[in-house]
Image (cartoon, rainbow, N blue to C red):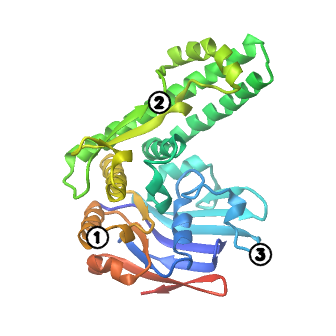
């Protein structure tokens, strides 16, 4: 299987990188160097080749190199289904992020038609023990990877909900205003719920079909109370809940209240009750299953971003992870503090050392 991959990545005034360029092939990219050298900044740049705000969820101006704050540019050649596509993203000082594909302005959604990018970061290690918001974001990233239009549904829902919450707080009583917003929320909310469940079905099927060294997770969308997911039921539920929502000052029914419940299948144990190592293994398992499901649907493996993943695994688990990534055919950008963490990859990967001097990151092909 020929995976999607970046054959060239160029950064200008992005985070700690004043100027940087990486020329790559379809193999995994092993990036090593000391903490704070700028390894994760490279992965964040690659994450921008998918719809959304990237793996750090940063606003565009925050990505500019300091102290200059001149704006930034990330560009690259994306090998996408047999075509080389020129992708450029930039943000002028204090402005918004702009996207051009093959020299033409394009919306963010267009990136989802060219490539899929999945990631795992150290901040996600707390996924099973933090609040539900982080798990919802994780769930929606899975759904977005299969259905690029999922992001538009989420934006439409959030916009309508913000307006409805404003009416509630201002004690507006006009039912016509509420009805219009609740109709929008019901339509987009039903699309969100359906997308989430369809995505989890695909991940579950990929887990069942694969032999893997990582534990299988049983996943379920959960709500604090019964929540209708069909549009013709969600609309009336929102209408019926106006009084309660007005007292709370916010909307208490809808897909924004969802949580992602996970169990370590072999032990029938909730993910939050597992050891730290088991929780990490479950995360890796889910990302790999997500990637396998996408590869089966698209005919090409997604790009993977695995930040500091090797540091939390013993030598056997690292080797197993590398074997699975290579078998998948994914261009996985992986970071670690030392080159020795990637020894098991042998010549199956490209290597890149990142150092820092005077507040500037520098790249050295290894």
Q: Residue at x 52, y 74 (%)?
A: 39
Alpha carbons under labels 1 and 2: distance apart:
37 Å
| Front-most of residues 278 and 315 | 278
Q: Is residue 76 visible?
A: yes
Residue 204 placement (x, y as % from top left): 29, 41
| Front-most of residues 220 and 275 | 275
What residue did someone put label 1 on? Answer: 314
| The N terminus - image quarter | bottom left
What residue did someone put label 2 on? Answer: 193
Residue 363 placement (x, y as % from top left): 53, 83
Q: Is residue 299 visible?
A: no
Left or right, 211 with reference to 294 = left
What residue did someone put label 3 on? Answer: 68
Alpha carbons under labels 2 and 3: distance apart:
43 Å
**Quadrant of the image occupied by residue 281:** bottom left
| Front-most of residues 106 and 264 | 264
| The C terminus - image quarter | bottom left
Check disc 1 and report its element: helix, strand or loop.
Answer: loop
Q: Earlier in the sequence, mark 1 or mark 2?
A: 2
Residue 343 placement (x, y as % from top left): 30, 80
Q: Earlier in the sequence, mark 1 or mark 3?
A: 3
Residue farthest along the left direction in this orientation: 211
Q: Residue at x 45, y 34 (%)?
A: 195
Residues packed near mark 3 inside 10 Å, few (<14), some (14 to 19) or many (20 plus): few
Q: Residue at x 52, y 54 (%)?
A: 50
Residues packed near mark 2 inside 10 Å, few (<14), some (14 to 19) or many (20 plus): many
Residue 174 placement (x, y as % from top left): 77, 12
């Amino acid at each position: 299987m020929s995976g999607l991959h970046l054959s060239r990545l160029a950064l200008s005034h992005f985070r700690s990188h004043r100027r940087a360029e990486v020329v790559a092939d379809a193999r995994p990219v092993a990036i090593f160097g000391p903490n704070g050298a700028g390894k994760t900044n490279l992965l964040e740049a690659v994450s921008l080749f998918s719809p959304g705000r990237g793996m750090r969820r940063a606003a565009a101006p925050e990505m500019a190199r300091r102290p200059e704050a001149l704006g930034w540019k990330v560009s690259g050649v994306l090998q996408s289904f047999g075509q080389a596509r020129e992708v450029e993203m930039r943000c002028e000082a204090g402005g918004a992020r702009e996207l051009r594909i093959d020299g033409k302005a394009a919306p963010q959604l267009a990136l989802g038609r060219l490539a899929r990018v999945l990631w795992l970061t150290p901040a996600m290690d707390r996924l099973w023990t933090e609040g539900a918001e982080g798990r919802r974001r994780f769930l929606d990233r899975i759904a977005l990877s299969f259905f690029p239009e999922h992001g538009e549904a989420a934006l439409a829902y959030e916009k309508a909900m913000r307006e409805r919450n404003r009416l509630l707080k201002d004690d507006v009583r006009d039912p016509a205003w509420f009805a219009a917003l609740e109709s929008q929320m019901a339509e987009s909310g039903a699309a969100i719920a359906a997308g989430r469940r369809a995505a989890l079905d695909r991940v579950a099927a990929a887990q069942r079909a694969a032999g893997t060294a990582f534990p299988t997770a049983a996943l379920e969308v959960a709500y604090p109370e019964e929540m209708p997911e069909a549009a013709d039921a969600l609309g009336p539920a929102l209408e019926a809940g106006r009084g309660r929502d007005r007292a709370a000052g916010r909307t208490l029914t809808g897909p924004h209240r969802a949580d992602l419940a996970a169990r370590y299948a072999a032990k029938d144990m909730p993910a939050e009750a597992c050891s730290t190592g088991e929780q990490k293994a479950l995360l890796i398992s889910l990302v790999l299953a997500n990637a396998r499901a996408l590869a089966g649907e698209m005919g090409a493996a997604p790009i993977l971003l695995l930040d500091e993943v090797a540091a939390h695994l013993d030598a056997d688990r690292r080797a197993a992870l590398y074997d699975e990534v290579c078998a998948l055919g994914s261009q996985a950008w992986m970071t670690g503090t030392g080159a020795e963490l990637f020894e098991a990859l042998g010549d199956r990967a490209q290597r890149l050392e990142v150092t820092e001097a005077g507040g500037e990151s520098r790249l050295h092909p290894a």
